[in-house]
Image (tube, rainbow, N blue to C red):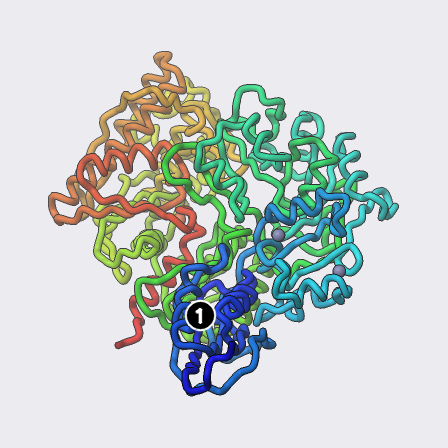
Amino acid sequence: MRVPKERLVRKIVRVSGVVQGVGFRPFVALLASRYRLCGWVRNTSGTVEIEIEGSPEYVDTFVDSLLSEAPPLAQITSVSSLDADPIGYSHFEIRESTAEEGGRCVIPADIAVCEECLQEIADPKNRRFHYAFTNCTNCGPRYTIVRRVPYDRANTTMASFAMCTDCAAEYHSSHDRRFHAEPIACPQCGPRVWLENEGEIVESEPLRRAGELLFQGRIVAIKGLGGFHLACDARSDGVVRMLRSRKGRSAKPFAIMVRDIKEAERICELTPQARELLLSRQRPIVLARKKPSPGISEQVAPSNKNLGVMLPYTPLHVLLLEYSPAALVMTSGNLSEEPLVFTNSLAREKLAGLADAFLMHDRDIHIPCDDSVVRADYSEEPVLIRRARGYVPEAIQLPFESPEILAVGAEQKNTFCLAWEQQAVVSQHIGDLDTAETLDYFKYAVDHFLALFGRRPAIVAHDLHPAYMSSQYAKAMQVDTRVGVQHHHAHVAACLAENGCTDRCIGIALDGTGYGTEGTVWGGELLLADLKDFERVGRFAVVRMPGGEASIRDPCRMALAYLQSAYQDKCWDIANSLGIKFSELETRVIKRQLETGLNSPLTSSAGRLFDAVSAALGVCRERTYEGQPAAELEAAVDETEGGSYAGRLYYAEGLLNLDFTPIFRCAVEEFLSGTSVQTVAARFHNSLVDLLARACEDIRNRTRISTIALSGGVFQNAIITIKLSERLRASGFDVLMHRVLPPNDACISFGQAIVAASRHIIKG
Ligand code: ZN
Ligand code: ZN
Ligand code: FE
């Protein structure tokens, strides 16, 4: 039943957002056939382009359905349609993609294996039975295998695998759920797995063999989706200890991968949000409360109430866990402080001393991507701790139109960010830029991003700290404009922009250390800030950092700085009764540093206060990883305790000072008189919340501003975050928290981009 020519209408439709690699073109073809419409669809660099022709009613319904019935993984940001003269197309087709200058490009994130694919690999009659690279339009690798745009097989690392006739038939059939699934593969034509064990290459049942090795207490390097993991039996103290000693990682918690949600539930208390996250298409590592004696080695996450758990997210992991212990330690395959290893050759070279065997495959990873980490042990909104696989490169919508900007981020937990038009894309977790390897990875990832999204930004935003490697990179870039952004302003601006807030607000930025504007080290800051500018209105009262960097590595030095502030000359006696000891030489040096300030800057850092309390109470006196003293102090808290100590607020140098010395003194005295660590740790947390809330009330009284943004690594602490936000809301504040980015320095690049954009906004 053909529509008469005079009744035909034709429309040219453009759909933007995450519309490539999510089954959008097959969906369009299906819609067209439902409404008996002709024309074509194709991917361009950033959008899906459609020409559609038929009767006017159906053409309109078709356009409406694009939005209302879009595939589950699509995220449409806009649909535009233009009328055009009818041509008289005879059928509907999917056309070859075109790359287009200047278009938007949105590559989808990697997606965990879907239910239908899982059923196929479990079905002995299916041709993909037990096939480790099974995927479809709704699941599988994306970001990590894309070399360039548009997102087509030829532009991915699957290009080297020629489709067999069966796969090709599925790929080209609009009725198949693998229609245009770019990484489509099967045992005939796709990637393969093998095991390398003591010089022997095992090609027959490598997954079963790897499982046996894991049962035998071996450490196996496993190539996954975004890089290598080091895996071992999470139930065995012996092998987890061995992994710790080989990796040179004495206490930092490991994540585990468990066979299924039942096993996760057996091991951890799962809040509804934790369950949902574990099963989500992003499949992050979820931090959840350990249950008593679940049979997991205490060595996995020592001195920690939580356990990082994830479910298998590729068929390879699903199959491996059928043959292996039901809970495996799965830690990033890297040398301490170096980036994730992601090529077979680098794995053999770098991981040789760490792993006993290698489970390899031949699907190349083009860009590595670590597992994401989300904290969900409380009923509040989950907090992202590390944003990478599954989330990157999803765009964040901006509350304004931005010029093209590259923001290079901070030094620790580095990410970088690219902003253009009305969106920003934040990179995956890169790491700490203090090794040459991580810096190389940073540069590789920046180049990849710029090419992938076809951007040549004329503006680069960076931290004010001149010694950050990211700042130096920005300095060396050939650009028109450089914008230095204060670290804590970037924190607050990121939080505001994520929440779509463009107003001036009170920003609380609490973290370890950040470069201030007047020579002191910042980190406990109260700002009046909007997206463009800020004014510092309050801070944690300053103490010395004896020995500068040395006091970051050694929390006992910070304990001494606070002891001196509380007890002056008597501080050494009190330190002694607390059991804090320094060598004779160190004692002499620190004494001098505290007296003269030599190499001992003043700091308002919140992180250093946590270090001091943690060390004073004997919770953590030896820091082996960043954030350890604070994390262990939080873990020590008795959550039923409601008491607190009184801090002091005073004005000096035009700033509201939050003086924690009286709080520190009370904590020490209660502890010395026999009150339990759990109680004192709780009271310290409560006191900090109380003093911050009082400070905010004071600022509100003077400014009439009642919106508060919370940012900084301290807000990884659930007790502080929950109690402070509850307290502030109860006293009438509007509280904004990070939703899409971590509160730690991973959000800095986005904040820098926001501030730079606000200062260079495109007119009109
Ligand atoms: Zn699937
Ligand atoms: Zn095939
Ligand atoms: Fe920070």
Q: Is mark 1 on a helix, strand or loop?
A: strand
Label 1 sits on what residue type?
Val
Q: In this view, does 320 lie to the left or right of 40?
A: right
Does residue 239 appear left or right of residue 616 in this picture?
right
Apparent side of residue 127 relative to residue 378 in the rendered image (left or right): right
Front-lying residue, 676 or 143: 143
Q: Is residue 180 visible to us here? A: no
Image quadrant occupied by the C terminus: bottom left
Asked whether, in this view, residue 446 is left or right of residue 743, the answer is right
In the rendered view, would you say 294 is above or below 247? above
Horizontal and vertical percent for residue 460? 42, 69
Q: Position of residue 118 (x, y in %)?
A: 65, 45
The furthest residue to the top: 674
Quadrant of the rendered image containing residue 99: bottom right
Residue 647 position, x and y percent, is 23, 30
Vertical order, 365 against 600 (above or below): below
Residue 506 horizontal/vertical position (percent): 23, 48
Q: Can residue 138 be seen in this view?
A: yes
Viewer-closest of 128 and 676 = 128
State the image quarter where residue 147 is shown.
Answer: bottom right
Q: Which residue is drawn at 41% across and 63% down?
A: 67
Whether residue 689 is situated above or below residue 152 in the rendered picture: above
The residue wearing badge 1 is 15
**Image point 53% across, 64% down: which residue?**
27
